[in-house]
Amino acid sequence: MAEMHNTNILLESGTNEIEIMEFTIEGNLYGINVAKVKEIMIAAPVKPMPHAHAAVEGIYKPREEVLTVVDLPKYLNGENKHKGERDIFIITNFNKMFIAFRVHSVVQISRISWTDIQKPDKTVSGGAEGVATGIAQCGEDLVTILDFERIVAEIAPETSIQMEEIDSLGPRSRNEKPIWIAEDSVLLSKMIEESLRKAGYVNLQMFPNGRELWDELNRIPKESGLFEQVALIITDIEMPQMDGHRLTKLVKDHQRFRDIPLIIFSSLISDEMRIKGRDLGADEQLTKPEIGHLVSVMDHLLLRAQGGAD
């Protein structure tokens, strides 16, 4: 069916806007960031795989590449229902993986501001680690934005952040440099924090979105030493209220904050996204879940910043 062409989905850098693809499951509206979508296709027969997660239908080969198919209605509702002839496969690309998600229909694409997306109440999201990462106001409709990274991490834990990558770095010294991290996924935030603490970075301040990090940055008294308060910033891209690209633009355009090293750590890093981040001034851009690489880059940037300070 329709392939998502990058020229149509890449928004102007740093505007704090997002394009949401709205789709339905059992008549309920859900959404996914268009930047995660490669194409949409009519659902086709799937080859079952033994011993797979209950929500994994099996595999599907539309062309040369074999795709894992996730039955999103079953994942969300826990029921085996009849597969509709008009069901749709949303083919996604994030974390360097291509995965097909079965949905019942695709409705439209809405372009909105991240400020129009609110963090859901825990009773709505399914608890602190629920799969609803945000509630978006798209016109007159409320759309539940799903945390696809969390869904994939649950179905295939080996594709998410691996603590073994930290172990492979060998013995490490304690580092008390203040590190600020903006990450909206509760699950990934916990995994990142645990991994960095194990790597020796013990002075971590976590923020659920770019807006809260930016507001806290502006509260630092001008008379205090800036780098004693924040030595390095790590940010996701997708976050309610303020995304990582907008945060990067604000930090790097600000005379006082621009020298703080900033790493974009996101599942969305692609060639096009890398160009956006570079133009905004990000010091480094890394793809989740490469936590070992993240630690090595942090080491390098902090050492470089310390040399500049000297």
Image: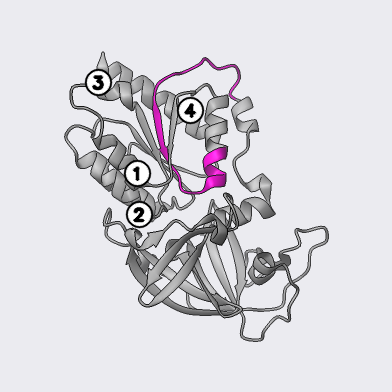
Say above or below: 73 vs 83.
above
Depth order, front residue of 208/161: 208
Say above or below: 163 vs 119.
above
Kindly identify which residue carries mark 3: 225
Kindly identify which residue carries mark 2: 241
Amino acid of disc 4:
Ser
Please tell me the numbered disc located at residue 249.
none
Labelled pair 2, 4 in contact (Cβ < 8 Å): no
Q: Secondary structure at mark 4?
A: helix
Amino acid of disc 2:
Gln
Depth order, front residue of 112/212: 212
- Range of residues picked out in magenta: 169-190
Q: Quadrant of the image for the C terminus?
A: top left
Q: Which image quadrant is residue 212 in?
A: top left
Residue 204 visible here? yes
Residue 4 visible here? no
Depth order, front residue of 284/238: 238
Labelled pair 4, 3 in contact (Cβ < 8 Å): no
Q: Secondary structure at mark 3?
A: loop
Q: Does the magenta segment cover residue 183?
A: yes
Labelled pair 2, 1 in contact (Cβ < 8 Å): yes
Q: Residues within 10 Å of mark 3 (few under 14, many from 20)?
A: few
Say above or below: 36 vs 210.
below
Point 33% across, 36% down: residue = 283
Kindly identify which residue carries mark 4: 296
Q: Secondary structure at mark 2?
A: loop
* Label 4 vs 1, first from the N-terminus: 1
